[in-house]
Amino acid sequence: MNKNGNYDVIIIGGGVIGCMLARYLSRYTLDILLIEKESDIGSVTSAANTAIVHPGYDAISGSLKAKLNVAANPMWDNLAGELQFAFQRHGDYVVAIGEDELARLDMLLQRGKQNGVPGMQIVSADVMRSREPNINPAVSGAIWATSGGICDPFGVTIAAAENAVLNGVTILRETVFEDFIWNEKRIVGIKTNRGIFTCRRAINAAGLFADAIMHKAGVRPDFKITPRKGEYFVLDRTDFTVNNVLFPVPSDISKGILVTTTVHGNTIIGPNAQNIEDKENKENTKSGMDEVFEGAKKLVPNINPRHVIAVFAGLRAGGNAACQTPGIGYSHDFIVEIPTEVQGLVNLGGIESPGLTAAPAIAQYVVELLKDAGEKLQEKKNWNPVRPARPQFRHLTHEECDALIKKDARYGRVVCRCENVTEGEIVAEIHSPIPALTYDAIKRRTWLGTGRCQGGFDMPRVTEILARELGVSQLEISKKNGASKFLCRPTKEDGGAQ
């Protein structure tokens, strides 16, 4: 960290948008700080979504959302190569059930063409049945968008953040934005729970809380983020799988409840869409989960509750009508701007789906905005776009596993049996460029604890490894932050029962 607390750029928010911004801006001779209020980066919206890289046919033509989605989609192959995260491009399907829905596919097809989406075509019911054996027999046809893909959204976020750190960016977690520091109408710094940091530019990438931060800056006072909660089921890959990303024909408020494969081999179903007020409410509800299951069964009728191994919910940071795009009246567009009312602020808001997909294009767009605003961005001669991935034992050949164990015996000790995650992988994440300090941080980085037993086998061993590597008591190890500690006292001490 800059010892004086003085930076050129401060990014507020450590989700996929903030971390991608940090990665792209690290290319230039800027002293950059990224702050995140949670105990880990990427642990809110970026860790709880459908993990789809969208082609760009859904967003309203002419909106910034559509432009950045379509611009970003082809960037993902190179990005995955440089940052070495899991990404697969197999296309996605919008599936019509019955003749009434079949007629509605033309609208999406035409919108996709207007948006410049390549490789879209209508496929017949027979073709859809052959490509997805589990599909509803009442399928009447589908749009196949060949540029669709899937990723691990947290893997993307951590990879971008680590690359930023390797290129000189400072990241502070558990650092809460409180207010701006002003020199007349110019923002010159921020106040946080960890002190004051000065800057020439502050970037609002706070996701669900972006409205509160822009209001602190006196920008867009009528803009409000209403969280839209989406609930999901995760299915055991040993019991049930689908081969594809299957969307229903969308409604006016949502892309609908989909059934999709993942880069980890599991099937997930969801989300529903519930507007709520509480930006911390990620509870699953019976009514919501019933809605998800019924929606999924419309696409894939043979999904069974016995296949479910986990549930989760995520919040999307959509905005209200205050972010209409001039000329098209679209009330849920992205905000990516340098406001004229104040100096020193880059303002982002309303980055709902397809925000994950659009993240690299959003970062490039911000770079161009800064250049247009007169920022002298000088490229570093030693900037390195590559973030080396750490070994994942379950994906190695037997020969690669043997070689790794010979170098470090800890890779020969399996801690998570369901996902075949080893002690060596856990230790590597604890000592990585952005250290994993909690159980959930280890889980998101390694996929440990996500199988049938949901951590029942590995949790005691993981807490032991974390305590040992961090040099603290196991009583200090938490699930996700200091308020979620696993253990409250030892049951045995000095040989005697307590």
Image (cartoon, rainbow, N blue to C red):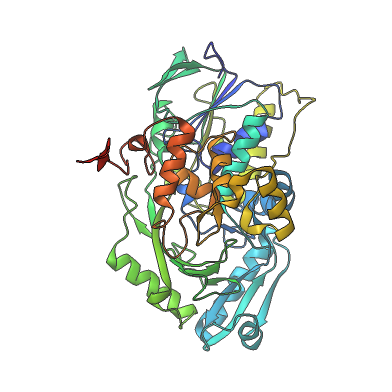
Depth order, front residue of 387/214? 387
Residue 252's place in the image compared with 482, above or below, is below
**What is the quadrant of the N terminus in the image?**
top right
Residue 480, image quadrant? top left
Depth order, front residue of 369/234? 234
Residue furthest front as drawn: 495
Place of residue 207 in the rendered image (x, y in percent of width and height, measured from the top left): 46, 41
Residue 264, image quadrant? bottom right
Q: Residue at x 71, y 26 (%)?
A: 28
Place of residue 372 in the rendered image (x, y in percent of width and height, measured from the top left): 68, 28
Q: Residue at x 41, y 70 (%)?
A: 308
**Whether residue 320 is visible:** no
**Whether residue 240 is visible:** yes
Q: How many marks?
A: 0
Place of residue 470 in the rendered image (x, y in percent of width and height, measured from the top left): 46, 32
Q: Residue at x 41, y 20 (%)?
A: 194
Depth order, front residue of 191/383? 383
Place of residue 420 in the rendered image (x, y in percent of width and height, measured from the top left): 55, 58
Q: Residue at x 50, y 62 (%)?
A: 418
